[in-house]
Image (cartoon, grey):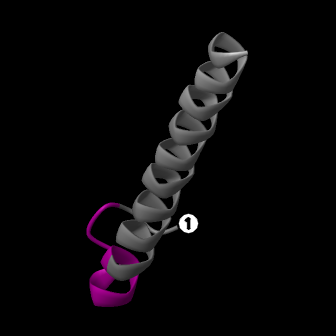
Amino acid sequence: MPGPDGGGIDGSIMERLSTDGVLWCVKLAVLLITWNNGVVTGL
């Protein structure tokens, strides 16, 4: 893997995409957890 400034534009784009992917997964996980908790407490 290249260094912090060795990736260039492509490196920053891939880094941003991977970061957005992680954030999206975290948001989805939180949403599912809260939804499951709501269903469990609702029952």
Name the quadrant containing residue 43.
top right
The answer to whether 11 appears left or right of 40 in the picture is left
Residue in the foreground of this view, choosing between 6 and 15:
15
* Crowd rating for badge 1 (residues with CA inside 10 Å; few <14, some 14–19, many 20+): few
Residue corresponding to mark 1 = 1
Residue in the foreground of this view, choosing between 29 and 42:
42
The answer to whether 15 appears left or right of 42 in the picture is left
- Residue shown at the point (31%, 61%) measured from the top left: 4
Name the quadrant containing residue 29.
top right
Query: What are the residue bounds of the magenta stretch?
Result: 4-12
Residue in the foreground of this view, choosing between 15 and 37:
37
Return the x and y of residue 26 as percentages of the image width and height: 51, 42
- Residue shown at the point (47%, 45%) measured from the top left: 27
Mark 1 lies on a secondary structure that is: loop
The answer to whether 43 appears left or right of 8 in the picture is right
- Residue shown at the point (43%, 51%) measured from the top left: 23
Q: Residue furthest top?
A: 41
Kind of residue at disc 1: Met
Q: Is residue 5 magenta?
A: yes
34, above or below 17, in the image: above
Return the x and y of residue 5 as percentages of the image width and height: 26, 69
